[in-house]
Structures are given as C-alpha cells and as structure tokens.
Image (cartoon, coloured by chain):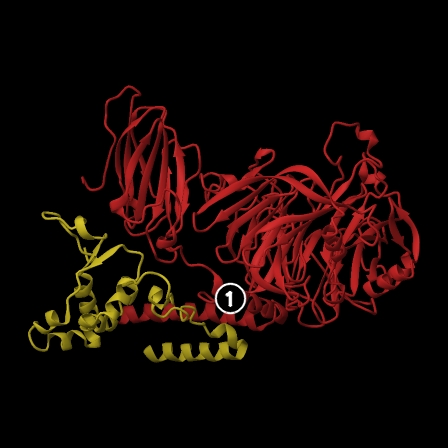
Chain colours: A red, B yellow
C-alpha cells in the first residue's frame, strides 16, 4: 500500500511540475495578448454555430464552397459547373441536363463571382448566383437546398467575367462578356478585330417568386475587354457600371498592347432606359442558340431547353443608354459604395484609386460635358465625374468593399495588402499585409446597400510557406480580419478549395430557418419513384431494364435481381424512403462508368449500368448510414445475351 | 504522504490562478449537447423511437425508465433499431417494488442493460419479422 501511495505521489508531482511550467509560459506573455484574443474570436465551441456563412467560389474547380465564419470550417462544396463524383452531379441521369450547353455536355468550368440575392438593397438569403467564365453561363443556387437549381447559357459572350452581380431588388443579374468576339460568331481574320469584334452585356431577369432567369436583353458594346461590374444602388439604382480595359482593341500580346492608353473606361449603363427601349421595340432579335437548364425539386430532375433568340440593344445607336467614364490604367474592380454615390475604379497599373461621383456623372450628362465619343457612345470628361483619388495607397489595386460606416477596403495584389480608406476624404486609415498576393476581398453584404461590417475576408492566390507543404500544388487561402475597430485585426487564415476567387457572405440567421431537412416522399414526382417497398419492380423495355428500387435502413428492395443480360442498359432508379434529417444513402455498382449515387431522404436518383460480362455482381450502400450499413448490399445476376433466365427480383426471398 | 500530495495540488492551483486564470480553467466543451443526439431539435422529420414513445400514453413507464437510465440518445440513433416496447401493464405485472427499485440512481446501469435488451438492431417491420428467425438484441 505504501509503495502504491508513493507512486501516486510521484505521478502527481510530475504532472504538477508539468502543469506549473505550462502555466508559467501561459502567463509570461510569450504568445501575446493579441493572439489569445484572435483565438477566442475564431473559436466556435463544439456544438455551437458560426455567426456567418461564406460562399466561396472555387475558381477553376467550378464549384462553390460553404464555410462558417469566424471558424473557417468547411461545411459543403456545392457542385455547380463541374461534375462532382461525390454527389453524382453530372453523373446521374437527373443532373446531366444541368451541364448541357449549346456545345454539348460540358463537365468543367471556372466559377468566379458569387452574389446573394437582394431585396430593397439588403441581402435576402434566398439564392446565390455565380458565373461560369469559360463556356459562359450563370447559375442560381438555392439556399434552401444548397443545390444548383438553374443554369442558363449566355450567347454572344466569351469569358463571362463581369458577372454575376444582382441589382438591389434582384430585378436583374448581369453577365458581361470579358472577350470581344465576332457577333454573331463567324469565320474571319483575327487581324480584323478592331471595329469588327463586339461585346455583349446581358441582363437576366429574375422571377421574384421562383428565381427563374431569362435573358431580358443584351447590350451590344464596343470591342473592348470587360472586367467587372456592380449595380447602382439607392440614388443610382437603375444604373449598372462595368470596368473596361483593352480599349486599344488589341488582339495580341495584351500584356503590353492593352496598356497603351492612359485611361480606359467605366461604362455606365442606364438599364431603366434599356427597358424603355425594349418596350419601344428598339431591339434587334438575333438568332442565338443557348441552353436553359432547370432542376425541379418535385421531380428531383433537371430539364434542358434550347433557346433560339435573344433581344439586342445597340449602344452605339441608342442615345442615353451608355456613357463612358475615363478611368486610369486598365481598371479591374468596379465597386459601388452602399449609398450608391461612389463608383470606385481600381486601375491595375495605377498607383492610385479613382472614385467617380454618381451625382457629378448625372450633372455631366445633363451638361453634355463630353470629351468625344467611342463608337457613338459619349465619353464624359474625366474631371466632370471625378469625386476624388486615393493617392498612392499601394501597388496593383484590384477590388473594394465597404463596411457601411463610411470606410472602404481595397486589395492590392502586387504589394499583398488590404488598405482601409475613408470615403469622401480619401485618406488611408490602415493597412494590413496578406499572405500572399490577394485578389478579391469580401465583407458580408459589402457590395450591397447594407454591409455587415464585422468581418472581412481577403482571398489569397499564393500561400507558399503558410501551411504544411503538399507537393508542388499548395492550397490557396482565405484570411479573416475583424474590421469592427479602427484598425483591421488579422484573426485567422484557412485553406480553401480550388481558387477562392470571390465570395459572398451573410449572417447565418438569414438562412438557417429556411434550410431544408429532407424531401417529402408524398411530394416526389420523379417518373421512376416508388414510395413503398411493395411497389418496387423491374421492368424490361427491349434492351433497357428499369429497376424501381428503394432504400431504407438497412437494405435495398429488391436486393436480388436476375434476368439481366450482357448488352442491357440497366437503370437503377433508387428512392430513399427515409423521412429523417441527415440520413442519405448511396449506391455503388461494380463496373459502373459513372459515380456513386448519393440520395437524400425522399429523393430519387438514377444510375445507368451497362454490364459487359456474365456473372453475379454486387452493389452496396456507399454512405455510412447506420449500424448495419455494411449489411446494406445486393446482387444482380447478368446472364449471356442468349440466356433464358427470366427477369425476377426479390427481397428476403419474397 | 497523503498530506503532502494535497499540499502540492493546492499549490499548483494557486500558481495557475496567479499565472493565468484562463489556462487553469478547462471549459466543458460537451455542454452544448447534454443528451447527445437526443438533444437535436427537429420537428420536421418522421418521429424517432423516443418521440413516438413519448407520444404514446401506454409507454409512459418505459419513457420514465429510459430517462432514468439516460439512454435517450440510443433510441434516437440512426440505428436501425426495433424496440420491443413493454407497455405500462407489463411493468405493473412485475413483482411489487421492482420498477421503483430499478429507477433508483444506483441501479442506472442495471436498468439500462434491461432496456437495451429490448432493442434489436435492424428494422423488423411487417414481413421481415418471420417465424424461426433469430433476433439479436443490442445488448448482444
């Protein structure tokens, strides 16, 4: 007994010693009070929720990732423009139409600028819109299901970059081309670019109930490059602003040849005027082929429709539709402050930021204070619209967002920093480094009439030494700042999926109540759904075999199928009968040339399987669903083509 | 010897409080879900076994027993589980005092074992409950 006690005592002494030293270093201030505050600010205790959502685009991953802020935890990657084997997006029969375009099935794209729908200039948390750059498209993602519900292709467009920003009541989401191209497309010499290539800026009307989009009109613009855009708001509601570069209309080595002009333009588009022109019939109807894909939650299926025409307004011929505001050095970002008065142009090659005044612009238009024209579009005098200049804030300015307290925050790619400055006085208030080479930044609601100016996220292109190395390809990052005080405070940087090109953020309470838990079986209108095991069956239609299958913890019905022949095309139409939150099931079939299926409760999905060899082939549940998940399996027998085995199916021998 | 251990420990606590109060306190990070999965609030999904039992008057003794045994979280688990639920009269048929005895805090583990012996992994619904079929209980 004594012996034991001694040992206990020694153990205590040792642990006490360790603890004392731990306490000592904690109290000595080695890590600094500031770090502790930052840790506390980003720590979301187990079981607690983040205060904000961040929807971070995946850039070249083509997806949209959902993070919690301030923790930086990744919750979901929503497949949008790229196939996703995890969720069967683009692999199952139901979602393949979503990726259909006038070029056929396109399994990848480059997703850039998410923007959340607005009502009265405030984020309403209903939908996120996002653009595909490469094969021009705009997607709408539901914030009830966190799934892509609609994708519309944009004709007459290429490098759909100045997209997909919404007006203050989500009247429109815009899709501006980056590249100018022959419109309509035709076989012509590239050298004849100048004066012949054109650009189309598309205005997509959004149905306020369903969110369904359609291209209301396109505005045909001179053959510049178009970079970014933002809507007017408040006093400037009814206008849209687009930054342009390559007003030189160079068609080669743009790195140099697009930087010859001292100034390019911000194009101010009066979309209410455009509506009047459309109403007055001043548009041209162009034939154009583009797909319009809609996913319906009732059928759990998408349809793809080919549209055949688009209405085009020619900016060169319609007075009052477009004005050009000279802006130095290839402006990239084109950002409008919450009041709608200031339009910030960030000349990539300029050391200063140019801020235009909407009020002065209106006056200049009234006074016809023009400095010539470009292809019939009036150019406003630079001084006539200039509100002020932020002098020498940094190198390589890109994007600006606002905190709603009269401050603006601009990213600088070359000098890797975020600079805070004051609207109206144009003085620099603070600067903080980013790690490294920051592109966009995001303040939740920071490009709306009502920003939520607590957090700011800077999205970095290069991380080099910031994380554990992972070979030549290292992650990009998002860097979280607290901007509630006078000075920005770095709290956290967290790795992201793909390229965090841009993001949209919103307080969580605007979304969580609407988030769907499961789909109701009685509302399932999928043509191949069955709502009970009694209805399950296998039907042969020539070489097509349709299996009406169900799944519930922890079995498939049927789970033994015979009578399939080599050369058949077997459709597994699988309905998840669960009516319980967070109980998806999956399906994997040996040799299937698609992905797994991942089926939410109440949902039906279809996998096509084309067996090539006779045998008895297993299938199983791929989503760890229950304690008997490993028992959730079945067999499908494949016989030679000339076999007489009759079609049969069963569960538990019945 | 015992005394010296106590002295050391109290010194340790004192030192920590002097040094840095925060590192001395360890926060209870499990507090947000005191009943495990049974803490989940979800009024849309189909009723789970526990919710169904709570709504069934004739299972009130069972519910009280489940709560006393603190095994609510087992009954709301993804399972699948089939509970062979004793109705109130079944409890009443037990020798007098049995239920009261089992509900005592010191018999919590015993009560839990008895209750879990009424739950079978798998869904024995309708035709799947057949003659001659062995059913294993969650208790093993």
Q: Residue at x 68, y 44 (%)?
A: A160
Is residue A55 positioned above or below A621 on the image?
below
Is residue A548 positioned above or below A443 on the image?
above
Q: Residue at x 44, y 39 (%)?
A: A92
* Left or right side of A105 for B50: left
Q: Mark 1: give few (<14), some (14-19) or many (20+) Cα within 10 Å.
A: some
Is residue A427 among what the camera can see?
yes
Compare residues A611 and B38 and report the one nearer the observer: A611
Is residue A342 positioned above or below A643 on the image?
below
Q: Quadrant of residue A365?
A: bottom right
Q: Quadrant of residue B62?
A: bottom left
Count of number-bearing discs: 1
Q: Residue A29 placed where, x, y %?
A: 61, 71
Compare residues B22 and A276 and report the one nearer the observer: A276
What chain does mark 1 sit on? Answer: A
Compare residues A606 and A56 and report the one nearer the observer: A606
In the rendered image, which quarter contains the C terminus of chain A? top left
Q: Residue at x 18, y 75 (%)?
A: B103
The extreme top residue here reads A642
- The kind of secondary structure element at disc 1 is loop
Q: Mark 1 — residue?
A: A44
In the rendered image, which quarter contains the N terminus of chain A? bottom left
* Left or right side of B76 for A415: right
Q: Residue A499 placed where, x, y %?
A: 62, 47
Q: Residue A250 placed where, x, y %?
A: 83, 37
Is residue A492 among what the camera can see?
no
């Amino acid at each position: 007994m004594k012996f034991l006690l001694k040992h206990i005592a020694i153990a205590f002494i040792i642990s006490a010693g360790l603890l004392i030293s731990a306490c000592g270093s904690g109290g000595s201030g080695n890590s600094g009070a500031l770090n502790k505050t930052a840790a506390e600010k980003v720590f979301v205790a187990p079981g607690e929720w983040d205060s904000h959502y961040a929807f971070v685009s995946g850039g070249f991953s083509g997806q949209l990732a959902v993070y919690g802020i301030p923790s930086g935890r990744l919750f979901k990657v929503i497949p949008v423009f790229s196939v996703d084997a995890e969720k069967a997006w683009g692999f199952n029969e139901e979602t393949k139409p979503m990726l259909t375009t006038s070029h056929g099935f396109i399994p990848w794209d480059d997703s850039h600028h998410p923007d959340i729908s607005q009502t009265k200039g405030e984020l309403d948390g209903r939908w996120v819109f996002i653009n595909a750059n490469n094969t021009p498209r705009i997607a709408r993602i539901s914030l009830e299901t966190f799934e892509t519900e609609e994708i519309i292709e944009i004709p007459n467009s290429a490098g759909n970059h100045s997209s997909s920003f919404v007006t203050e009541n989500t009247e429109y989401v815009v899709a501006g081309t980056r590249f100018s191209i022959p419109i309509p497309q035709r076989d012509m010499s590239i050298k004849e670019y100048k004066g012949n290539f054109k650009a189309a800026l598309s205005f997509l009307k959004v149905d306020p109930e369903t969110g369904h989009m359609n291209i209301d009109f396109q505005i045909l613009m001179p053959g510049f490059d178009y970079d970014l855009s933002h809507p007017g708001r408040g006093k400037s509601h009814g206008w849209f602003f687009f930054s342009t570069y390559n007003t030189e209309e160079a068609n080669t080595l743009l790195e140099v040849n697009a930087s010859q002009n001292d100034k390019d333009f911000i194009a101010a588009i009066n979309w209410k005027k455009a509506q009047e022109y459309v109403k007055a019939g001043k548009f041209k109807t162009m034939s154009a082929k583009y797909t319009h894909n809609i996913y319906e939650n009732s059928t759990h299926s998408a349809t793809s429709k080919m549209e055949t025409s688009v209405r085009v307004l020619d900016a060169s011929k319609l007075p009052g539709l477009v004005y050009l505001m000279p802006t130095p050095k290839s402006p990239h970002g084109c950002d409008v402050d919450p009041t709608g008065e200031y339009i910030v142009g960030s000349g990539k090659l300029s050391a200063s930021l140019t801020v235009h005044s909407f009020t002065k612009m209106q006056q200049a238009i009234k006074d016809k204070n023009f400095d010539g024209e470009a292809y019939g579009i009036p150019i406003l005098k630079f001084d006539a619209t200039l509100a002020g200049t932020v002098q020498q804030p940094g190198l390589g300015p890109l994007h600006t967002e606002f905190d709603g307290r009269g401050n603006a925050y601009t990213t600088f790619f070359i000098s890797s920093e975020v600079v805070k400055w004051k609207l109206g006085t144009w003085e620099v208030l603070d600067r903080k480094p980013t790690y490294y080479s920051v592109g966009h930044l995001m303040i939740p609601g920071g490009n709306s009439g009502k920003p939520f100016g607590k957090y700011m996220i800077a999205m970095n292109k290069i991380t080099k030494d910031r994380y554990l190395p992972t070979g030549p390809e290292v992650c990009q990052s998002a860097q979280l700042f607290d901007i509630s005080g006078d000075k920005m405070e770095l709290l956290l940087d967290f790795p992201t999926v793909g390229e965090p090109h841009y993001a949209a953020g919103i307080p969580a309470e605007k979304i969580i109540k609407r988030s769907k838990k499961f789909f109701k079986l009685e509302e399932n209108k999928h043509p191949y759904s069955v709502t009970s095991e009694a209805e399950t069956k296998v039907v042969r239609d020539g070489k097509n075999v349709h299996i009406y299958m169900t799944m519930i913890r922890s079995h498939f019905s049927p789970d033994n199928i015979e009578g399939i022949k080599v050369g058949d095309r077997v459709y597994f139409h699988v309905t998840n009968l669960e009516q319980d939150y967070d109980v998806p099931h999956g399906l994997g079939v040996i040799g299937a040339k698609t992905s797994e299926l991942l089926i939410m409760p109440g949902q039906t999905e279809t996998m096509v399987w084309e067996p090539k060899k006779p045998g008895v082939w297993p299938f199983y549940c791929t989503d760890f669903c229950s304690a008997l998940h490993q028992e959730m399996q079945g067999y499908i027998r494949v016989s030679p083509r000339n076999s007489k085995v009759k079609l049969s199916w069963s569960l538990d021998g019945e | 010897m015992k005394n010296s251990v106590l002295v050391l420990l109290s010194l340790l606590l004192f030192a920590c409080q002097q040094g840095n109060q925060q590192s001395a306190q360890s926060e209870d990070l499990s507090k947000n879900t005191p009943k495990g999965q049974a803490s989940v609030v979800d009024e849309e999904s189909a009723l789970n076994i526990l919710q169904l039992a709570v709504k069934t008057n004739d299972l009130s003794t069972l519910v009280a027993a489940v709560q006393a045994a603190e095994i609510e979280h087992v009954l709301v688990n993804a399972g699948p589980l089939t509970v062979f639920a004793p109705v109130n009269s079944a409890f009443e048929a037990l020798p007098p005092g049995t239920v009261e005895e089992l509900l005592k805090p010191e018999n919590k583990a015993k009560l839990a074992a008895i209750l879990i012996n009424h739950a079978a992994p798998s869904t024995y619904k309708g035709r799947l409950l057949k003659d001659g079929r062995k059913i294993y209980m969650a208790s093993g």
